[in-house]
Image (cartoon, helix red, strand yellow):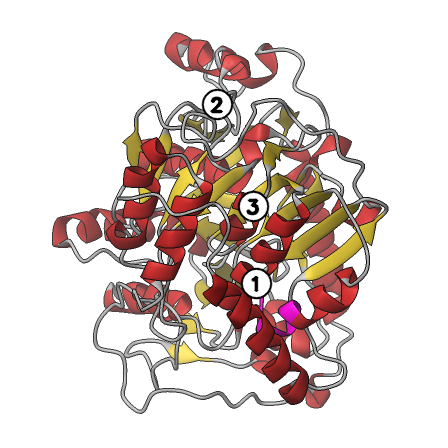
Amino acid sequence: MGRVPRKPTVSLKRLAVSILAVALALVPQKPAAAMAMELVEDTLFLSGPSMSLDDWVRYRELTRNRSFARVVLVNQSGGMVDTALGIAEDLIARRVTTVVAGYCLSACTYIFLAGERRQFAASWPLSRSRLGFHGTYDRIHGTLSGGRARVAAYFQSRLPRESHDLVIAALDRIPDRRGFLYVYHPAHRGDASLCRGSWEEKCEPVAQSNALSLGIITTDALAEISFPEKLAYRNRFLGTDMDSVELLTDSDDLARFCPPSASRCQEFARAFRDRPPERAIAFSLTGRSGASWRSDDTRRAAWRALFECARQSGELCRLAAVNDRLAAALYARFDQRSAEAVSALARVARDGLEDERFEQAELPMTRLRTDTFTGPTPERIPGAREIGTRELVSLMGRSEVALLDVWCGEETLPGAKCVFGAGLAYTDREADRKLDELFLKLFDAIAAGRTVVIFSSNSTSWLSANATFRAARAGRAVHWYRGGIEAWRKAGLPLVPSAPVGAVVP
């Protein structure tokens, strides 16, 4: 591909002006924008889940007649292409330095590449920092859409020729917006990862392709940044400040989870401290173990460790350590908060709880869903009974049910057991058969002779529908709490920190 001049094309400038004019005419006086912006002395901080058209307007208002030398992107996951390119053009003219702290994905990378000098932040762990490139996608269906030519031309103008084949190819090779070409600082990982967006398909390593070798960063030196308090790095996992829990100082702290005669288990446990982050290790009650390291984040490391443990043991497992912290505090906190919350439920006026009504499909569920896991959920699930918040509170007060959380966010219902991936399903029959087998083993361990209530994040999550369908299909006693965590929270009922006990997919 031929190289275009470093200065953006005139069409970008026209685009920026037109967006601003239209936005000023159409948006409310106080738009609710998703991306946070803060200008502190000579540094502009951009963070948040998504960029909207409103954010272009807010950016212009914030930065008009103000100078700054650096832009720090903190856990920013992209958004509107037009907004990102408009901001990028302004930053190129200002000749700023751009810095990534945490993740910078999708359209966020357009802003990052606008920097004349581009770096990773020093005060953010490199194991938790990455850049993610992919194409332009339809906002509703998430599939490839127009806009490729504009983005490709922009990448060509900001990257060296030798990186074009890989980075620009990501615009076409990743058909789903959930997929990315992930690129890392060379001190953390020398290879990039090409992930196509299907959770069933493993990411492909791209050898000798890191942020420096591809010219995405201009130096491997780390930028010293003074972050505002609300954006400062915090070592949190499932809602717990991990810096406040006990430090893993002795390898024997993990070896004690192994049976006395299990020398291989003990050797495996003692080697854990030397594994690169992000890492986690889990054990079953019988001393079977599973570990993961060099993951993109702590959650993925914990998920994989719990899967390996559950796969080998067929039992519920618990994390023993996450990076350099012992995980016993996670479970102690979960048990204590759950006991307090269940006790508080006995004082809840159940007559004051509403019977929820949700948007739903018109037909009963007949098969597992394997791709998009959000949308109107089925009218009913054969073999399972749907219950609402009022009935669930009553059942929990009498200890008549066990709870299975297939969402596994930072918070869950009191006493609920989180199993990563329990609501997923494979298109491949043999792979799904193995998932089903492990799911039922963990389900039975959680049930312990009781009916299990399965729930997820909200009423549009097919994760809880899938898991309930699996259990009912196998003849297990199961209730479906369709409303999930959202309905529970809306009712003003107590939530507790999650503490995972297994995983059924890697």
Foreground: disc 1 or disc 2: 1
Q: Give the residue type that dot 3 points to.
A: Phe
| Quarter of the figure with the C terminus | top left
How packed is label 1: few (under 14 Cα within 10 Å), some, or many (20 or more)? many
Q: Give the residue type that dot 1 points to.
A: Gly
- Residue 142: image location, x then y, percent: 35, 67
Q: Give the residue type that dot 2 points to.
A: Pro
Which residue position holds label 2? 186
Q: Residue furthest right?
A: 41
- Residue 66: image location, x then y, percent: 81, 56
Q: Residue at x 77, y 63 (%)?
A: 64
| Quarter of the figure with the N terminus | top left
- Residue 217: image location, x then y, percent: 52, 32
Q: Is residue 327 left or right of residue 304?
A: right
How packed is label 2: few (under 14 Cα within 10 Å), some, or many (20 or more)? some
3D distance between C-alphas at marks 3 and 1: 13 Å
Where 275 falls versus 45 (above or below)? above
Frontmost residue, 206 versus 311: 206
Which residue position holds label 3? 112
Frontmost residue, 178 versus 10: 10
- Residue 437: image location, x then y, percent: 24, 49
Q: SS for tag 1? A: helix
Which residue position holds label 1? 86
Q: Residue at x 34, y 87 (%)?
A: 361
Q: Is residue 392 visible?
A: no
> Where are the magenta residues, as a range?
50-56
